[in-house]
């Protein structure tokens, strides 16, 4: 799969641009603040219906405009598909494939997958469990649509249950018959999601390990473990015992919304004990494993969006990384860089050719 | 928007409070009424007032009715051993239009949704329980015909819990491929359910 072209109207710092891409390597070069990341973000929109950076859609409209439009043509298995995304202030986001509007945005997710490697990624290591859950959920949602639907239902049920807990507390009464449907859904959907996360972890981890070893070239022992309250044998009974505590706390203390993905290096927490270099390698290996798994699952390569990675990695790692991703003839890659000469020299040292898109202040100059 | 008359503005504001009607549509309706003979508007207004003042809700099933007890509940031809539980009057009308059902109804007036502050006490659930537990009740079967949303399912689950000791037969609507529909157009969830809940072949 590849993105043939992109049209941006009033999106972030772009007023009106149209660009065509090659199906292999595309280098987006320009000064800081010229709009390189914004261009990758537009591709992220077309893939995942939202921004990778700013989750408030309206803030992605160009200053003093009232709408933005992102349009792109993907080629998948020899056929063109036009994806259209538009947001007008005060209205609902419109998302279309080949002029047909989606009833639900979730229907689009996974059809045109993309993997973004960006400077902000170290939040996966640094931040809380919710960020890691979200990271792995996004991968799972792209390869398993039913997983996404179950997760959305689970979260809806959780909100209903939490509202009910508040209602119980305010009314100083708790009808066990009334909480039971929510417990039932929580267990039923939770069990399905847990099983899928577990299977995914088993499949993902060896791929990750292989990527890490390849980039790092050393024998650090890395582990990703998936930990859930559903791992306990007697988990179904746990929920029955937590009601009074839950009412007091007004939140549900048991469920897959508490699941943890633990990242370890040499048996210790990566966040506290990994060096800067180890953390960077870890994040890139996470993303490359994600790329491989999506590719294997879909039967075609997702877009690979590499945002500003050259500044963050040493030359040796960059060469390994580029060698790895460019080895696959069928993958389309987008790289941003502030220094065009550096990109060119890295590509030529690997005998690769790249299509250079030079931008300045939201305009295409080459 | 600037209106040439305050009366027009008032009418537009009132009409645009209705679901699905914005200011522009409201203005179009108002201007239309203004063109019609005076009597038309008068009879519309009277119909609305009468509708609001005189519509009653059946004391037994809570369906909209002109009488204390609605036509369905008071009909001797209806089977009083079956009660079909639905969300609102529109569902009664939909099932009545099939001509396939001769039992009685019970209108809940909504479904349980704590997020929206709707609990069992805001719905006609206690009257349903009273109705089926009454000493002179002939009810043997309860059909749960709520919409197949998470809230509908939760409400069905709750009602089932509440009557589990009554020994009543509880059924729900079959879910599956639409009659006359083509399989390839059925959504995956519906088709999946139809496969798991398949039935013995019966020639039509």
Image: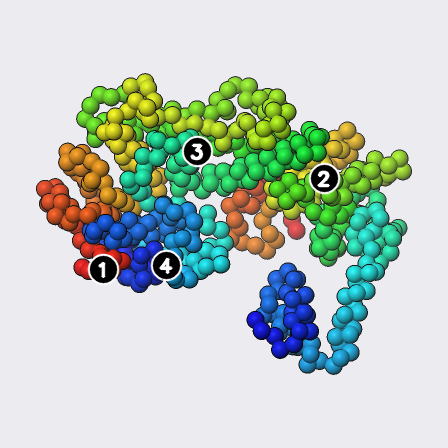
Residue denoted by label 4: A63
Circle 3: is it few (<14), some (14-19), or many (20+) Cα within 10 Å? some
Q: Which residue is mark 2?
A: B120
Q: Secondary structure at mark 2?
A: helix
Where's residue A169, x and y in %?
A: 66, 31
Disc 4 to disc 3, C-alpha distance: 32 Å
Residue count near mark 4 (Cα–Cα under 10 Å), binned few <14, some 14–19, many ≥20: some
Residue contact at pointers 4 and 1, CB within 8 angstroms: no
Q: How many marks?
A: 4
Locate residue A207 relative to residue B188 in the image: left or right: left
Disc 1 with disc 2 on a shared chain: no
> Is A104 on the left or on the right of A204, as rendered?
right
**Real-space Cα distance between discs 1 and 3?**
38 Å
- Pointer 1 residue: A364
Visible residue check, residue A177? no
Q: Are dots 2 and 3 on a single chain?
A: no
Q: Do marks 4 and 2 share a chain? A: no
Q: Which residue is disc 3 drawn over?
A: A130
Q: Earlier in the sequence, mark 4 or mark 1?
A: 4
Q: Is residue A301 left or right of residue A151?
A: left
Q: CA distance from mark 4 to mark 1?
A: 19 Å
Determine the chain carrying the residue at label 1.
A
- Asked if the residue at tag 2 contacts the one at tag 4, i.e. Cβ–Cβ closer than 8 Å, the answer is no
Q: Position of residue B60 (x, y in %)?
A: 84, 47
The quarter of the rendered structure image containing the C terminus of chain A is bottom left
Q: What percent of the width, then of the height, locates residue A200?
A: 39, 31
Give me the C-alpha separation between circle 1 and circle 2. Answer: 60 Å
Residue in the picture at 66% in, 36% down: A167
Q: CA distance from mark 4 to mark 2?
A: 48 Å
């Amino acid at each position: 799969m590849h993105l043939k072209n992109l049209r941006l109207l009033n999106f972030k710092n772009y007023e009106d641009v149209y660009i065509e891409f090659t199906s292999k390597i595309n280098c987006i070069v320009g000064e800081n603040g010229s709009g390189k990341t914004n261009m990758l973000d537009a591709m992220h929109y077309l893939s995942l219906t939202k921004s990778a950076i700013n989750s408030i859609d309206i803030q992605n409209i160009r200053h003093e405009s009232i709408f933005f439009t992102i349009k792109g043509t993907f080629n998948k298995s020899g056929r063109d598909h036009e994806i259209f995304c538009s947001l007008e202030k005060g209205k609902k986001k419109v998302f279309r494939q080949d002029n047909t509007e989606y009833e639900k945005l979730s229907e689009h997710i996974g059809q045109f997958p993309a993997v973004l490697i960006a400077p902000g990624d170290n939040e996966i290591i640094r931040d809380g469990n919710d960020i890691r859950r979200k990271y792995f959920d996004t991968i799972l949602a792209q390869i398993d649509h039913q997983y996404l639907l179950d997760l959305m239902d689970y979260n809806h049920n959780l909100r209903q249950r939490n509202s009910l807990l508040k209602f119980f507390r305010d009314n100083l009464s708790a009808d066990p018959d009334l909480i039971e449907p929510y417990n039932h859904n929580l267990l039923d959907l939770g069990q399905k999601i847990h099983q899928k996360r577990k299977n995914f972890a088993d499949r993902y981890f060896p791929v990750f390990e292989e990527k890490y070893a390849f980039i790092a070239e050393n024998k650090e022992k890395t582990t990703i473990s998936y930990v859930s309250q559903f791992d306990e044998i007697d988990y179904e009974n746990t929920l029955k015992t937590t009601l009074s505590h839950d009412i007091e706390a007004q939140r549900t203390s048991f469920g897959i919304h508490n699941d943890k993905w633990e990242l370890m290096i040499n048996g210790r927490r990566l966040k506290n004990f990994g060096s800067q270099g180890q953390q960077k390698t870890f994040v890139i290996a996470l993303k490359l494993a994600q790329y491989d798994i999506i590719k294997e699952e879909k039967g075609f390569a997702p877009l690979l969006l590499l945002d500003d990675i050259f500044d963050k990695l040493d030359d040796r790692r960059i060469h390994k990384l580029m060698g790895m991703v460019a080895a696959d003839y069928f993958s389309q890659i987008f790289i941003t860089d502030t220094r065009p000469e550096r990109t060119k020299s890295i590509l030529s040292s690997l005998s690769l050719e790249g299509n250079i898109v030079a931008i300045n202040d939201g305009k295409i100059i080459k | 928007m600037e209106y040439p008359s305050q009366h027009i503005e008032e009418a537009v504001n009132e009409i645009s409070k209705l679901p699905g009607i914005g200011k522009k549509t409201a203005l179009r309706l108002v201007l239309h009424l203004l063109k019609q003979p005076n009597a038309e508007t008068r009879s519309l207004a009277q119909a609305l007032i009468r509708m609001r003042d005189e519509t009653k809700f059946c004391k037994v099933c809570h369906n909209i009715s002109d009488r204390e007890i609605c036509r369905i509940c008071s009909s001797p031809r209806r089977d009083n051993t079956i009660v079909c539980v639905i969300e609102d009057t529109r569902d009664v009308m939909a099932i009545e239009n099939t001509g396939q059902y001769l039992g009685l109804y019970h209108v809940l007036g909504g479904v349980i949704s704590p997020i929206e502050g709707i609990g069992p006490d805001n719905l006609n659930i206690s009257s349903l329980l009273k109705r089926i537990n009454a000493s002179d009740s002939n009810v043997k079967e309860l059909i749960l015909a709520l919409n197949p949303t998470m809230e509908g399912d939760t409400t069905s689950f709750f009602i089932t819990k509440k009557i589990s000791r009554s020994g009543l037969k509880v059924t729900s609507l079959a879910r599956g491929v639409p009659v006359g529909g083509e399989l390839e157009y059925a959504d995956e969830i519906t088709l999946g359910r139809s496969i798991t809940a398949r039935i013995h072949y019966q020639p039509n």
